[in-house]
Amino acid sequence: MYLPCIIARRGQWGKLRRAGPYAAGGFDPLPSIIYNTQDGRPGYGPPAKRCLGTENPGMTRYMHRYGHILLLVLVLLTAAGFRFYELQWDREMDAFPHPDERHLANTMSHVSLSWPPDWRNLLDPDHSSLNPRRINPEDPAGGHYDLAYGTLPVYLYRFLTVIFPGRQGEYRQFFVVGRITTALLSLLTVLLVYLLGRTFWGRREGLLGAALLALSVTHIQLSHFMTVDIALTAFGTAAVYAGARLVARGGWWRALLMGLMVGCAAACKVSGFTYGAVILAAGLLVLLRPGDERLSRRLGRTLGYMALAGLGVVLAFGTFEFYALLDPATYLEAIGRQAEMVRGEVDWPYTRQYVNTAPYVYHLNNLLRWGLGWALGIAGLAGVLAALVHLVWA
């Protein structure tokens, strides 16, 4: 009985008359059920108070306005449940199994800042207590502490451990605070994905993207470790979102924010510099955006945006990787060792699992099966293919 009402509310009066019980003409015994629809044309169906979805117009308007917020909260709560569940999964062990976690914890244990600060010591990269890559006093050869990652996560986790010291001892507290911080950054990334989807396409697409990331296997797994990957992804996603808003709305502060986020991503891991492509893409889209503005003026504003974004990169990276600027040789040496590992020029035990694996196929298989999960993996690949097709046809 609600179907005629639904059709009528859509304004499809002609279709209803052809399909209704009185399509052949004749006297209508129930003229009272012919009423005006929302678009002003007559409709056919039961009284308005019995129409599906109109029993409580106030609730309908409320759901239309705030329903997506409720769904987003549900997605975030689901993501939080998976990410905060059993953060201390290794509490019964007498060791911490993840080598990268131990590497960061060991690095944090020899990082400190005296108060009042000793400026002469802080400006000496070889001996500063704040430099994670300073000279190791226990090394007879005078070598430096090794840190392949950026120093922003080290400083962030170390600072939060000072604020929340805990009762389990400083070393174990590194893991407690670090994992909670990682899980929070993971939730922030889910929110940023929603905002990105809403900016590019709409609320539904944003919710879908956020839901897929909330259920991503890799994202959930890495949220249980005090590592740098989630922090890198959070800052990188924030850079992409700031770039998207810059293209859509303009604004000098958005250009600066985009650069700051790229700099923070690079200060988490050297691969974060690849997010510099966001600055180039945003600048190109601003330049090519249709409008009545003269090309010379648009070009000047675009160059100004990119210059301000570049300043943001320098400010963020220079703040959180300060010693990389004071002692670039040590920084590049640490990065070079990781590059040798990636190229297979050094034999380390934990890299032997990749020997004689099929290029691309091995990575794709792990990405779909264990990395993203089938839902997000297939959706991501389909999205990439659809984007390529659209780009070619466009």
Image (spheres, rainbow, N blue to C red):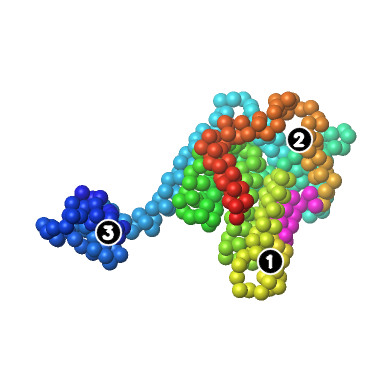
Q: In the rendered structure, are the residues bearing label 2 and label 1 in contact, judged by CB atoms less than 8 Å apart?
A: no
Secondary structure mostly taken by the magenta-highlighted segment of the chain = helix
Q: Residues within 10 Å of mark 3 (few under 14, many from 20)?
A: few
The residue identified by callout 2 is 342
The residue identified by callout 1 is 302
> Residue extending furthest right?
141
Placement of 366 over or under 257, stated as above or below: above
Q: Earlier in the sequence, mark 3 or mark 1?
A: 3
Q: Residues within 10 Å of mark 1 (few under 14, many from 20)?
A: many
The residue identified by callout 3 is 14
Q: Is residue 358 visible?
A: yes
- The residue drawn where x is 68% and y is 31% is 99
Q: Is residue 320 left or right of residue 211?
A: right
Q: Is residue 240 left or right of residue 208?
A: right
Which residue type carries mark 2?
A: Val
Residue 143 lies in the magenta-colored region: no
Q: Position of residue 382 (x, y in %)?
A: 55, 42
> What residue range appears in magenta?
310-325
Q: Residues within 10 Å of mark 2 (few under 14, many from 20)?
A: few
Numbered label attached to residue 184: none
